[in-house]
Amino acid sequence: MLLDAGADVNRPWDRWDVGRRPLALAARCGHLAAYELLASRGATAELDPVDAAVLAVARGESVRLPNARPPALGMTNNDYGWILGQFALLGRTDVVQALLDAGMHVDTRGWSNFTPLDQAAMHGRAETVRLLIERAADLHDCAFDDEGPTPLDCALWGWQNNHADDGDYAGSIEALLAAGAPTRHTSPTGDEAIDALVARYPAVI
């Protein structure tokens, strides 16, 4: 939408990591779809070794993450472990599986201290949610602190407040409910679709 409105595909960032172009940022964040879209619109950038390494992971060509700082503020990890959650929220189940197979911990924290399962659930990435559950992701984990949201809380909140157009929230919530994931939400939630799902698992909510 921004590009169609005339946004400059090569306008450099003017804060924190000053001078980095959008194409390089997309590579460094592992956002392959954004990278390919920008490139198709004529974006250019000289990729440094970190950008190139992350882009290779996003393309399924590697599972070696760089030893580098995250590309944005607000992340608790000072390395590239946060990107497991990034790929989870993007619904890149193939990349998540490859990184887990390569030895990454399933509950590695990323943005705002969320686990990959929190992030996948919040964005309705049902296939990724099911993979993470199969890999024994912590269903009881609370982001932020002991009072923070559980993965099922994240899915319920995302459905009602931050709905991704391509998200399968019903599938994500049902997978979490079937696995016995807890939530602080109470029924009825006021959403008929959610309440119909929850009714199948009365012991959870």
Image: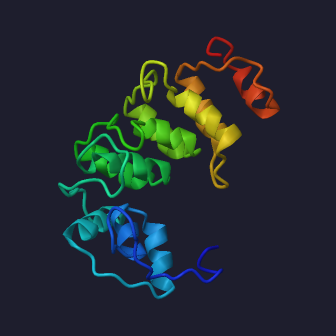
Number of marks drawn: 0
- Residue 7 shown left or right of residue 137 in the figure: right
Up the image or down, 200 lies above or below 9; here it is above
For the C terminus, the quadrant is top right
Q: Position of residue 162 (x, y in %)?
A: 64, 45
* Rendering quarter of residue 92: bottom left
**For residue 158, above or below residue 35:** above
Question: Quick one: quadrant of the N terminus?
Answer: bottom right
Foreground of the two, 145 or 81: 145
Q: Residue furthest left?
A: 67
Q: Residue furthest front?
A: 15
Question: Which color scheme did the rendering employ for the protein?
Answer: rainbow
Q: Residue at x 69, y 17 (%)?
A: 186
Q: Residue at x 66, y 47 (%)?
A: 163
Q: Determine which quarter of the picture holds residue 22.
A: bottom left
Percent x, y of residue 153: 58, 28
Q: Residue at x 32, y 65 (%)?
A: 17
Which sits in the foreground, 55 or 171?
A: 55
Q: Position of residue 184 (x, y in %)?
A: 60, 18
Q: Is residue 109 above or below residue 86?
A: above
Query: Left or right of 196: which side holds 173?
Result: left
Please give the name of the residue rendered at 48% of the width and 78% of the height, measured from the top-left corner.
38
Q: Position of residue 200 (x, y in %)?
A: 71, 20
98 is higher (above) or lower (below) than 54: above
* Farthest-out residue, bottom: 42
